[in-house]
Image: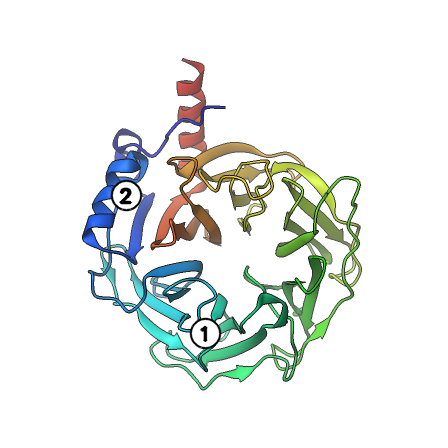
Amino acid sequence: MHVPKILSASLLTGLLMSTMFLISCNSKKSETADAEANDSLASDKEFVFGDKRDFAQCHASTLVRLDNGQYLIAWFGGTEEKNPDVGIWLSKGQQGNWSAPKEVAKIREDAHWNPVLQKTADGKVILYFKVGKEIAHWETWVKTSTDNGETWSDAYELVKGDKGGRGPVKDKLIELSNGDWLAGASNEVNRWEVFVDRSTDKGKTWTASPYFKIDTTEIKGKGAIQPTLWESKPGNVHMLVRTTGGVIGRSDSFDNGKTWTTIKKTSLPNPNSGIDLAKLPDGTLVLAYNPNDKDWGSRSPLSLIMSYDNGQNWTDRIDIATGKKEDEYSYPAIISFGDSVAVTYTFNRRKIAFWSGSKKDIIELAAKTKSKAAQ
């Protein structure tokens, strides 16, 4: 199926709220080639630092929005994923004014993975990240900042001595209406297993749930990982998960995330790539995902799609990054503020891209896409 390229200059001209710019992780030559090969990304693009950097590749971004409207964006960077020189990097700022990336976490010469940023109600910023030679045996470490990411505490283990990964595995955790913190977690020791990690004391201690059941008649392969969570009303918590079955999976809880339904398939395709979701104040859900239905399929395009009925139906889809089938626009992170969302994602393992827009922007872009497709 042909997917229209929607982020042309003509579409973006009238959308003042929508911005997309790139945290560059590669050379000028590569930047030029990327722009020529992906004209949907060629407008309103900004490289927020030059060629001087201490890593060749970057992946798995995360972001928070500070009270002053600036963002903190973190990712892992090094010669290549899984290499021992990979650490956690951070940039701070907003459109037109980003700080040079700096390495904020490197506790030993093992690969660092999957940072997750959280901003607490009292203004503290928490950085969770994984450390380990292999995913199956990684550890979760934590650093904190009380000055909006300018300085960071020493790193400590989230659950001392734990192997396999605790706390948020990729996507942001949520604070439930009862005050509990709930993190979507997963384990890849044998099968791919999903669980949730809960803290009732603002992150001091954590309790892991049992692994979720998965409907293997609907979802084939190794299983599911990397949940993204939301609470629809007090006590009702839901998750979408990445799976190996060519489709996004879903589970629901009606007791504050203590027990969960079996993971079943949704109507949303998934090429075994990371997803993330944000809920707007009016209940609208905005999902960032790759709309391909083959296990280890294409991670191009990267799309946003909205649901107005708590994820039962999904409409108003736009593609915020398009290119060739072999391109990779992956591992999105999405947050909401007011009626708007901000998204970061991996751009061909060489850049971290940022996109922001309102619900109205997405609806208008989706309508223009449908109109063009009908012509």
Is residue 246 or residue 3 the one in the foreground?
246
Task: Give the position of the C terminus as an image quadrant.
Answer: top left
**How are the colours assigned in the image?**
rainbow
* Residue drawn at point x = 26 percent, y = 46 percent: 45
* Residue drawn at point x = 77 percent, y = 50 percent: 214
Quarter of the image for residue 32 reads: top left
Q: Which residue is mark 2?
A: 34
Question: In the figure, 217 relative to 116: above or below?
Answer: above
Mark 2 or mark 1, whichever is nearer to me? 2
| Label 1 CA crowd tier, 10 Å (few <14, some 14–19, many 20+) | some
| Helix, strand or loop status at disc 2 | helix
Question: In the figure, 319 relative to 122: above or below?
Answer: above
Left or right: 142 as drawn, with respect to 95: right
On the image, the x and y values in percent for residue 51 come to: 20, 61
Marks 2 & 1, CB-CB < 8 Å contact: no
| Residue type for callout 2 | Asp
Question: In the figure, 311 relative to 259: above or below?
Answer: above
Return the disc, 2 or 1, that comes first in the chain's sequence.
2
Left or right: 362 as drawn, with respect to 266: left
| Helix, strand or loop status at disc 1 | loop
* Residue drawn at point x = 67 percent, y = 42 percent: 245
* Residue drawn at point x = 28 percent, y = 37 percent: 37
On the image, the x and y values in percent for residue 242 come to: 62, 49
Is residue 58 or residue 285 the one in the foreground?
58
Q: Which residue is mark 1?
A: 123
Decide if residue 153 is in sight here.
yes
| Residue type for callout 1 | Gly
Left or right: 250 as drawn, with respect to 354: right
On the image, the x and y values in percent for residue 26 come to: 27, 56
Question: In the figure, 374 relative to 190: above or below?
Answer: above
Marks 2 and 1, how far apart at CA: 38 Å
